[in-house]
Image (cartoon, grey):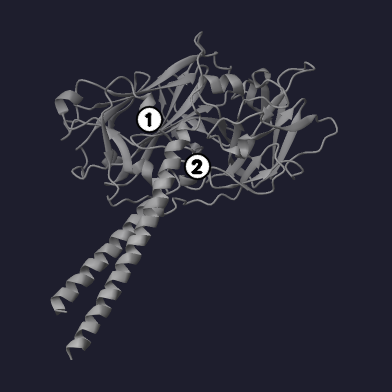
């Protein structure tokens, strides 16, 4: 073998190895950057000790568990759904705990902020019609749900299964969640299929009384969130990207959904993404804030300035009136042509009110590929129409005379805030007509992505093994060829 040919082969081999490991990192690497101290997943109505579920976690059955508070007055039973729709995960949705009176779960936790997720599959249990079940859930003086109908909620969202996510602050080492039917009638009942209690970093969402959040519209004064604040997650959106499943989150098992269904009109803008851009979190925005894929994908208005000046990039999110809402917007500059301040400046509008007039991601973050987020508070006064749209719009800021008349957004999170008496519970949504769509449509994209990830990693591994075998075998053949010449 000629020395130059051997050297070229080594270079090609090393390049392929590097490409493989780069592909492995981008496809197979875990995105976890936070390990929750409290990570409880309770499969209600189940006897199982450890059962692997759709989210890659082990769920524990609540029957005979330490989480069930014994009370001779509590009246509850466990049951199995009369049937399961295709594609619905058995854990935690196959079994349920039914309540006929007040029933309390007790979780031993460390003090601090916690996610509480309640999972529902409104179906027939023990011959009972789930549409007649109405549930109330309280924690201390906070009311998370009141007279809540899982059947109406599932029907309104066109989903067979769903969960409600809350953020609460636990002051001591014990979290008591009390479930009860919302009626004292003899045939009243309620149910829940699964409960999660997951801790989170301090100040991830509730940043304390020293951080004043700008309010948009009414009220006109800045607002603070402290340990007395309770939140309900209403939307968590990966703008311009795919669904992000719980196991692909940053360790807190959050679910991020696509933004397609929330975009107004035909002005979808342009997808923005760059998976090779040098990317770094900061102390202000740690790696657990949102998955990297949220910041590596986004949506912009496009390259045509004339068109951009004549429309808004708009999203609308139906919310319940009578509450304050925290709106968190995630940004990361992905365009490699934009590296300096005042190259892309735009205005942010929430409910037709200016939330920020001169948004400049580079100025906020300090550089390209650096995530940043901005929080805003907006209010929806009590109205006759219980559901109204929260509008989010972006438009180029012409006063800045920036180089590009464009805008970009990477992610959105919207939370409902408790009112003055600790109430987060709202009214049930109206009844919608028509059949439900398959609830797995939200998670099927994630499942498909997991499948592609496994296949991609497996194929890459086979390719790498083949390359190593090829080089070794080729070298061996060259040595044999030389021996035959002697």
Residue bearing mark 2: 246
Q: Is residue 278 visible?
A: yes
Q: Is residue 362 left or right of residue 228?
A: left
Q: Is residue 375 left or right of residue 47?
A: left
> Residue 446 sits in which quadrant?
top left
Q: Compare marks 1 and 2 and give the one earlier in the sequence.
A: 2
Percent x, y of residue 262: 38, 24
Q: Residue at x 28, y 70 (%)?
A: 470
Percent x, y of residue 82: 67, 28
Residue bearing mark 1: 259
Task: Tell which residue pokes out farthest to the front in this image.
Answer: 484
Q: Is residue 360 visible?
A: no
Depth order, front residue of 77/233: 77
Please, is residue 77 above or below residue 47 in the view? above
Q: Residue at x 56, y 21 (%)?
A: 153
**Which quadrant is home to the C terminus?**
bottom left
Element type where label 2 sits in the image: helix
């Amino acid at each position: 073998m000629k020395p130059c040919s051997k050297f070229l082969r080594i270079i090609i081999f090393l390049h392929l190895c590097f490409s493989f490991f780069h592909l492995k990192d981008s496809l197979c690497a875990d995105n976890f950057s936070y390990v929750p101290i409290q990570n409880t997943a309770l499969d209600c109505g189940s006897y199982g000790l450890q059962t692997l579920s759709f989210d890659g976690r082990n769920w524990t059955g609540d029957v005979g568990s330490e989480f069930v508070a014994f009370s001779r007055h509590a009246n509850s039973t466990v049951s199995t759904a009369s049937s399961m729709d295709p594609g619905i995960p058995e854990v935690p949705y196959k079994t349920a705990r039914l309540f006929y009176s007040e029933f309390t779960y007790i979780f031993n936790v460390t003090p601090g902020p916690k996610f509480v997720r309640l999972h529902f599959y409104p179906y027939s249990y023990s011959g009972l019609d789930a549409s007649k079940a109405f549930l109330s859930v309280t924690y201390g003086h906070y009311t998370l749900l009141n007279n809540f109908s899982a059947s109406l909620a599932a029907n309104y969202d066109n989903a067979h299964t769903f969960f409600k996510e809350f953020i609460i602050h636990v002051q001591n080492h014990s979290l008591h969640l009390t479930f009860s039917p919302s009626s004292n009638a003899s045939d009243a009942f309620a149910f829940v299929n699964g409960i999660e209690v997951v801790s989170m970093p301090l100040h991830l969402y509730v940043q304390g009384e020293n951080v004043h959040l700008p309010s948009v519209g009414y009220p006109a004064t800045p607002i603070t969130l402290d340990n007395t604040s309770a939140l309900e997650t209403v939307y968590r959106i990966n703008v311009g990207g795919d669904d992000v499943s719980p196991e692909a989150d940053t360790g807190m098992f959050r679910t991020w959904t696509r933004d397609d269904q929330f975009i107004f009109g035909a002005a979808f803008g342009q997808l923005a993404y760059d998976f090779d851009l040098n990317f770094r979190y900061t102390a202000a925005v740690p790696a657990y804030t949102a998955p990297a894929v949220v910041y590596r994908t986004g949506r912009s208005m496009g390259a045509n300035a004339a068109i951009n000046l004549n429309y808004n990039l708009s999203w609308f999110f139906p919310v319940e009136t009578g509450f304050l809402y925290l709106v968190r917007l995630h940004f990361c500059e992905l365009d490699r042509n934009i590296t300096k301040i005042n190259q892309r400046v735009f205005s942010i509008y929430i409910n037709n009110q200016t939330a920020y007039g001169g948004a400049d991601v580079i100025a906020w973050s300090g550089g390209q590929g650096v995530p940043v987020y901005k929080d805003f508070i907006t209010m929806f006064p009590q109205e006759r129409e219980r559901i109204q749209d929260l509008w989010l719009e972006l438009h180029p800021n012409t006063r800045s005379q920036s180089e590009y008349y464009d805008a970009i957004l990477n992610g959105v999170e919207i939370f409902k805030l408790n009112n003055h008496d600790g109430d987060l519970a709202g009214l049930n949504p109206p009844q919608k007509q028509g059949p439900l769509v398959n609830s797995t449509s939200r998670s099927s994209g994630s499942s498909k992505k997991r499948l592609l990830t496994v296949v991609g990693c497996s194929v890459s591994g086979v390719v790498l093994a083949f390359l190593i075998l090829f080089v070794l075998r080729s070298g061996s053949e060259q040595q044999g060829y030389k021996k035959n010449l002697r």
